[in-house]
Amino acid sequence: MSGGNAIRGTRVGAGPMGESERGESAPRRRVSYWCANGHESRPSFAMEADVPENWDCPRCGLPAGRDEQTPPAPPRNEPYKTHLAYVKERRSDADGEAILEEALAKLRRQREEP
């Protein structure tokens, strides 16, 4: 029972992975970031890469900054707004009453027509 499977006994990604196969790795540096919960994360960047001011904390997901004493504040969560809440932001109660009266008058006219 011999099959023609050429990759039998191997796994995805298996194979020679030395420096000669991958090429030379770029020189790297580690940068520390701290979040509001006090977690430190140290991602590595290439030496010539621009280092971002903020980084998402991998432990809690809050934004982290490079200054340990003053980390970025957690983002403010806006509550979910319904469609009615958005309409009430744009229209006053008087506007709503006028629109309702206009719509009711239109319906009454349509019912009176034969």
Image (cartoon, grey):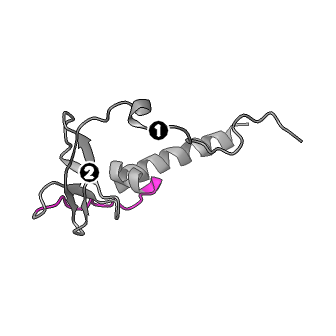
Q: Distance between the residues labelled 1 and 2?
A: 30 Å
Residue depicted at x 31% and y 35%: 25
Tell me: 99 left or right of 77. right
Residue 65 locus on image (x, y percent): 18, 55
**Chief secondary structure of the magenta portion:** loop
Q: Which residue lies furthest to the right in this view?
A: 1
Asked where in the image residue 24 lies, by quadrant, the reply is: top left
Q: What element carries label 1?
A: loop
Does 72 appear in magenta?
yes
Does the CB distance between marks 1 and 2 fall below 8 Å? no
Asked where in the image residue 58 lies, by quadrant, the reply is: bottom left
Image depth: mark 1 or mark 2 in front: 1
Tell me: 86 left or right of 43. right
Viewer-side residue, 47 vs 35: 47
Q: Quadrant of the C terminus?
A: top right
Q: Name the residue under label 2.
A: 55
Q: How many labels does the image show?
A: 2
Tell me: 59 left or right of 8. left
In the rendered image, the vertical position of residue 55 relative to residue 109, given as above or below = below
Residue 17 locus on image (x, y percent): 46, 38
The magenta segment: 70-84
In the drawing, what numbered circle is on residue 17?
1
Q: Residues within 10 Å of mark 1 (few under 14, many from 20)?
A: few
Viewer-side residue, 54 vs 87: 54
In the rendered image, the vertical position of residue 101 relative to residue 35, given as above or below = above
Residue depicted at x 72% and y 34%: 6
Does 93 appear in magenta?
no
Residue depicted at x 69% and y 37%: 7
